Amino acid sequence: MPEPVDPTRTRDQRELTTASGATWLIVGAITTVLVGGMLLALGWTLGDDRASLGAALIGVAMAAMLVVRVTVRARPTRLRLLAILFGLMVATGLVIVLLVAAG
């Protein structure tokens, strides 16, 4: 007998089970602009190439999100991959900022 769906559990939420993935792309695009722009400004101001590398990596993650959205047909797999790529974008931004701040 299948488990009942509990919408409060993370793995049962709509954005990871039945959504189209558009929300992940919108949030990813906003994050790319904000975090990528911040890293580019940080690199330009401090002259640190790591910040520019971080901005490029975030751009690559956004491009990967677009590729996943178009190529992966299995909806739950596609949504989980989009969530993972979004998390990598945010984590990359944080790690690069910490590395630049540390010197």
Image (cartoon, rainbow, N blue to C red):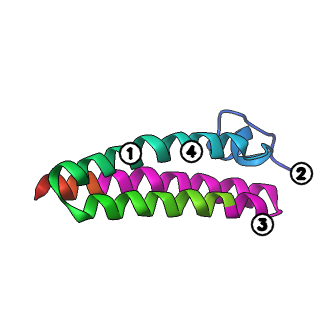
Q: CA distance from mark 2 to mark 3?
A: 33 Å
Q: Between label 3 and label 4, give the one nearer the viewer.
A: 4
What's the mark number on residue 61?
none
Q: Secondary structure at mark 2?
A: loop
Query: Mark 3 or 1 closer to N-term?
Result: 1
Query: Mark 1 or 4 closer to N-term?
Result: 4
Q: Secondary structure at mark 4?
A: helix
Task: Confirm or deny contact between disc 2 and disc 4 (CB under 8 A).
Answer: no
Q: CA distance from mark 3 to mark 1?
A: 28 Å
Query: Mark 2 or 4 closer to N-term?
Result: 2
Q: Amino acid at mark 1?
A: Gly
Q: Amino acid at mark 2?
A: Met
Q: In the image, what residue occupies the spot 80% across and 55% down?
A: 75
Q: Amino acid at mark 3?
A: Thr
Residue 80 colored magenta?
Answer: yes
Q: Position of residue 47 (x, y in %)?
A: 17, 58
Q: CA distance from mark 1 to mark 4?
A: 12 Å
Query: Mark 1 or 2 closer to N-term?
Result: 2
Q: Between label 1 and label 4, give the one nearer the viewer.
A: 1
Q: Secondary structure at mark 1?
A: helix
Residue 57 colored magenta?
Answer: no
Determine which residue is flagged by label 1. Answer: 37
Q: Between label 3 and label 1, give the one nearer the viewer.
A: 1
Q: In the image, what residue occupies the spot 73% across and 47% down?
A: 21
- Number of marks in picture: 4
